[in-house]
Image: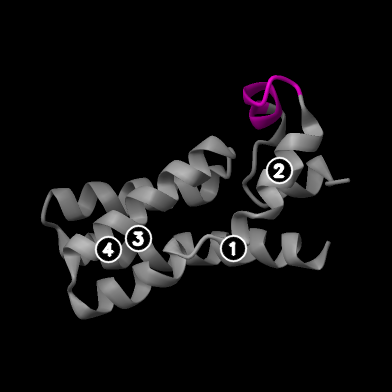
Amino acid sequence: MLDVQKLQELGVNAQEAIRRFSGNQGLYERFLLRFPQDDNFAQIGPALEAGNWEEALRAAHTLKGVAGNLSVSAVFEGCSRIVAAIRAEDYAAARAAYPAMAQAYEGICAYLRAL
């Protein structure tokens, strides 16, 4: 069973997500535990570094959707900043938004992998 308080500390609004999953906490937990398996995060950093804006946009937008559905708010907000910056062609801002998003992602994934 997931620790809702710990998730909140990591930037996950589990209560909101459980409501989105029609109150089915077990179903939510199964999906959240799969979050670290999503490969989009691994693509964002290298794409930003290489200036591959199309790839960075695709991966960040996809991860944003996954994080949003699971209420992984810290990752959702970071991806939102990256997506908005790329769309505005403010590539420096996209790169600048990445470290905080990556830290939030790594934090939640470390917790989930330890379960």
Q: Amino acid at mark 3?
A: Ala
Q: Disc 2 designates what residue?
A: 8
- x then y, percent, for residue 20: 62, 24
Q: Disc 4 designates what residue?
A: 56
Report which quarter residue 19 is drawn in.
top right
Which of the two discs, 4 and 3, sits closer to the camera? Answer: 4
Please identify the quadrant where the C terminus is shown. bottom right
The span picked out in magenta is: 16-23
Which of the two discs, 1 and 2, sits closer to the camera? Answer: 1
Which of the two discs, 2 and 4, sits closer to the camera? Answer: 4
> Rounded to the nearest whole Å, what is the CA distance between mark 3 and mark 2?
21 Å
Mark found first going from the N terminus, 1 or 4: 1
- Mark 3 burial class by Cα count in 10 Å: few <14, some 14-19, many 20+: some
Horizontal relation, residue 98 to residue 10: left or right? left
Residue 20 magenta: yes
Horizontal relation, residue 46 to residue 14: left or right? left
- Image point (64%, 43%), residue name: 12
Which numbered tag is attached to residue 97? 3
> Rounded to the nearest whole Å, what is the CA distance between mark 4 and mark 3?
12 Å
